[in-house]
Every structure is written in structure tokens, then in C-alpha cells.
Image: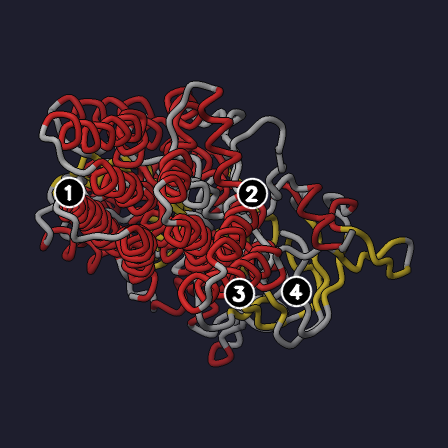
Amino acid sequence: MSEKKEYAANKNLKKEENHLDTDSCDFHCSENKNSTTNDQTCSIDEQNHDNFCSCCSGDLLEEKDPLWKRKHFMVIVISSITFVLGLYFDFFTPYSNLAQILFLLVVAISGYNTIKSGLKSILKGRFTINILISLAALGAFFIGEGAEGASVLLLFYVAEYLEDYASGRARKSIKSLLELAPVKALVRKNGEMVKMNIEEVNVHDIVVVKPGDKIPVDGKIIEGLSHVNQAAITGESIPISKKIGDDVFAGTINEEGYLEVEVNKKSTETVISKIIDLVKEAQNKKSKTEIFIERFARYYTPAVILMAVMVVLVPTFILGQSFEIWFYRALVLLVVSCPCALAISTPVAMVSGITAATKKGLLIKGGEFMEEMQNIETVVFDKTGTLTMGKLEVTDVISINDYTSQEILSIATALESKSQHPLARAILSHAKKQSLITNNNSVSGDKAHNKSFDVKEFESLTGKGLKGKIDNDTFYIGQKSLFKDLDLSPEWDKHVKPKIIDLENQGKTAIILGTDKKLMGILGLMDKIRDDSIATIQKLKQMNIHTMMLTGDNEGTAQSISSSIGLDEYRSNLLPQDKLEIVEKLLKEGKHVAMVGDGVNDAPALARSSIGIAMGVAGSDVAIETADVALMNDDISLINYLIDLSKRTMSVVKQNVTASIIIKSSFALMTVFGFVSLWMAVAIGDMGLSLAVIINALRIGSK
């Protein structure tokens, strides 16, 4: 067993083959009796699997060997040669009996599985498409049309083969994902490099990744600098610069530098393994349209058989017309009525749409969610980490008592460099941009005044701020409550209070700097709005979709963010249960609601909404698992793409279903009047239409 196959087996990604008492065709389709996706779908699959053609009922995402490596190609070649020889002996020689033997041989070679499956279905009391084809072929031999009977089974076999080939694009998408998942890792163990199976690598192990190699694990860089190609995970086309402390993902490619990565997830929990699992799971979640067509098939096939019987009986025994003519037309009707194209019209479009989305870094967990997205009327957003980066940045440095911005920022940076608070990280990041921090992470001194910024007697004042001495002066930095305790009321009311109110009205956090005698300045910080948030909201509005933001932040922050982005509505000071109640209220009003979030606190609302959309990289595991769609590169503009993709996909589904019904009905009508032969029924009404449906569906992925 190869490493790749061994890995797939260990990950349970390769579908089990079950040939025990199933009505399977030679293309390895089998009844789905073990699915636990939902009871409704399972029961439908079990009862109606064989109402479809044996190929089109198969697993569109199942990995298979290249077609030319399978026996089906040889079956077609041998059957075709035998069929041509039969035609030669039938029409150009007096050996018509030999021709009939050759036609029967064609039936035995290419029609064995079809007839076998049809007989099994009869014994189980089910009417299937295989029965339609078998009856048509055997009936043709009965009336002396052996050539047409053989052609029916041969063309049906070719149709299955070509449908399987055309559906290969969807399977290739899964195969490419499987190939992304590395099977080996170079691990540092006791000072030595050991090559290990990926399943044996543990959390906290140190993995070495050489230039050009795939990163085999999810982890954090502890040594090295490089550019990493993350296109497979996030859809980003440009390699991303990675340094010590940055996260990397399994299946991405180390473009140039040497890296050492500390593992933080087991191989079964990596982002790429979750993507593979979820895409595999998606194929089993059928849309409402798919479920309807499956139910329709339960009654369709027996109705067709009954109609064919009536086509024979009424003209022959009531109107006194030729039995042979109407019996032949009944056989043609059986073939032309095969619902192969109708059966695959929806699933092949769904697979094509889901595959196209995956290439964009957008993971849709099932056809039902693809179908629902076209109906969305309201999109509800979480704020932090969704509309914003979830990362504070310094936006204002306000001077008090004539201190310069550089002095204020230098002292604030010196104090905050001793802290691990998120506010401290934002101030340090801003100081680096202003070149106030040296390479050794210390604050550069004021050379003009020979001033140093070394902090002594540092103290963290829990819940209030920080305190420390610089050049024998004691400085404080922190919240309003810290300075209210220092008795600076006159100066506070005059210089500080109005500025703080102004900052808070803008949705910003105010941090105050000063001594125990006077105030020096105020730093305004704000959660950075994502670059694509404004454009995303504008496009949603152009589609007449209502937008709303739900946040636990205060009214001032919520109002500021909402107006900056251009949202229709916002709600502030919310707990997780409040978000859930708002989503439930919208649903009770009859609206189709999409919820976009990234945190654990968003999970209840994500689960309850019509469509839950999670931010993939930034989001928590709970949010991603709960959601129906994951944006793997945290690009919320993909919401607009998702809505458009859903509309295009469902448009193709409608085209396929409509074309299948109209063409099948037209052929059935022409059959009654004798304008369609058996070979035309298979080649055009069945095989041709099925291929047209597949090709039309594959257009979704080409846009």
C-alpha cells in the first residue's frame, strides 16, 4: 500500500466498497444504506438508489482510477467490434443466425451488469431504470430486431462510461485535496532528524521544513523566516511572509527559507484535514431539489412501465393495429423515458458549484446550503474579527500641557513594553511604525535632550493601568479610574473629559498618560475595520439585502463602526443569547437570514440562522464546526460571491431540470407517432441529454 493510500485509509477519507447484496453497476455504485447524514435522505437513498441509472446514482466525489486503466474501456472496445461484425454478417452476408449470436454476445459483455441489476431489483419488488433498459433490449430480440436490442445495451453502457468521465472534474477536486495532505514529516528527536508518518507526530514536536517542501503540520514557527504559499488553504495567490511566532498550516508550501515549526494540532485536526472531511461530508447533504427528484423517481419508473404497457394494449387490442409496430414503440418509450439526465441534473450542478467555491477559499458544507444562499434577505454580522480585524490600532495621540506626540508615545511605549495586554501590543506596534523602538525592542532615547526611557519600579495596577519611573519621574498610563484617584480634577474636567467623550463617541478606547501632578496626553485606540468591509456592505445593499451588526461593544463603538461601514442597522451591548434571540426573531418574521461570525459566542446564532458563515482562519473551532459555510481566507467579500454562485448554480439546476423534462416529454410524444428508433432513444434522448446536462453544470466552475 502506498503512503498516500495508507494516509487516506487512516484518515477514513476513502469510501468503503460494499458489494454485499447491492444493485450495483460495473461502475461501482452501491446503495447508501449506512449514511447518517439525516434520516430523510437515508431512507430515500435506500429506496430509490436504483431508480436512477447505475452510473449517475454513484458518488460524484468518489476518487477513482483513470478511466483508461479500468476494464470498462476494454468492454466498450470488444463490444463495439463484436457489434460491427454482427452488423456486417446481418446486412452483407447470408449468415444472419451468426449475426444474432454476435448481437447476443454484445448483450452478454456490455449488458451483463445492467440485466443482473434489473433482475435483482425485480426480486426485491422495486422498479428501476435497469429494468427499463433490459426490457427494451430483450423485447427487441423478441420481435427479431437483435441489432437494435444489442445497440440499446451497448449505448447505455457507453453513456454510463461517458457520464463517469465527464463527472471526473468533481472527483479531481477531492483527489487534489488528498494530495495536499502530507504523509511524512521530518521531526527533531533527541538532537536527530527522524522521518515519521504524519499520524505519529505529536503536539509540541518540532518539525523541520526545508525550502520547497510542504509544511506537514499545523503549528507555530519557532525558527526561521520564509514566504509560504497558502493558496491551497486560503485561496491567496501571493505567498505570505512568515516569521517566528506566525502560524502555518499543513499542505502549504515553504517557498524559500529553512523553518522549524512547533506542532499545535494532531494530523486529524489540521485545517487541511478538516477541509477534506467537510467537503466529503458535503456530498451527503442533499438540497431540497435533489430530495424532491429522488422522491419523484420512486413513482416515475413504474409509471413509465405502465404507460408502455398501455401503448401496446390500447392500439393493438382496442384499435386493432399491428402488435409488432406498437410493441416496438413501447420498447422505445421505455428507453427514452430513462430519467438519467433528470437524476444527475441537480447533484452534478451542486458538486460543480461547491468545487468552484472551494477553489476560492470558500468551503460550503452541502448542497442544501448552496440552494438556500440564493434566498438570503438579511445578513447579520458579528463585529470583532468579522467586520473588523479584532486587532486594536492607535488612531490618535492627543497632547495635553504642551507635550509633543513623540514624548507621549515614547513614554507610553516604555511603560507598555513591560505589559502583555492587547492595548500594549497595539501601542508597541504603532511605536515600531514611528521608528521609536530599536532592534532590541527597547525605546530609543531623545538624543536632542539626552533623555533615556528606561523604566524602573514598574508596577501593574490591576484593572486600572501601569505605573513606572523614568528619570526619577513617576508616570502612569491607563483608564479614567486610574487618574481620578490622583486628584487631578480641575485639569481633568478642563482638558481630558471632553476629549475622552469625543473619542468614545467615535467608538474608540481612550488611554491616558500622566504623572501624579499633571496630565500629558491621551491615546485613542480602535479596532481596525477590514479593508473589504465597506465594499462588501455596499454590494449587499445593491442586491437589496438588509445588513445588521450584532456586538457586545458599547453603544458609541457600535454606532461609530456601523456608520463608518454603512450598515442598515446595529445592536449593541449584546450577550450570546441576545444574538440568538435577534436571529430567531428575524426568522419568525419569515426572513431568510445569514449570520457571519468568528467566535464561540457567535456559535448559537450561527447554528440557528438559515445559513451560518464562519471566518475560517480567524474563527474559533466551535464557530467553524457550527457554521454551514467557512471563509478560509477571512475575506468577507466572498459573501457576495457566494450569493452570486448560489444564484448561478440554481439557475443551471433549473435549466437542466427544465431541459430534461421538455426533451424527454418531446421524445416520448414523438415515440408514440413512430418518429424515434431505439438507437436514437439511447444515443440522443438518454446519453446525449445526460452529457449536455453535465457539460452545462461544469460551466459553473469555469467562471
Query: SS of the residue at dot 1?
Result: helix
| Residue 7 position (above or below residue 39) | below
Residue of label 1: 672
Q: Amino acid at mark 3?
A: Ile
- The x, y position of residue 479, in whole percent, is 37, 41
Residue 651 visible to an observer of this rendering: no
For the C terminus, the quadrant is bottom left
The structure residue drawn at horizontal position 52% and vertical position 64%, both measured from the top left corner, is 230
Q: Amino acid at mark 2?
A: His
| Residue 99 position (above or below residue 118) | below
CA distance for labels 2 and 4 = 33 Å
- The x, y position of residue 377, in whole percent, is 14, 39
The mark that comes first in sequence, 3 or 1, is 3
Tell me, yes or no, whether the two marked residues, 2 and 1, touch with CB atoms within 8 Å: no
- In front here: 425 or 535? 535
Quarter of the view holding residue 139: top left
Residue of label 3: 81
- The x, y position of residue 33, in whole percent, is 51, 25
CA distance for labels 4 and 3 = 48 Å
Label 1 neighbourhood size at 10 Å, few (<14), some (14-19), many (20+)?
A: some
The mark that comes first in sequence, 4 or 3, is 3
Farthest residue toward the front?
A: 94
The mark that comes first in sequence, 2 or 3, is 2
Q: Amino acid at mark 1?
A: Val
Residue of label 4: 214
Q: Kindly identify which numbered label has been placed on residue 28.
A: 2
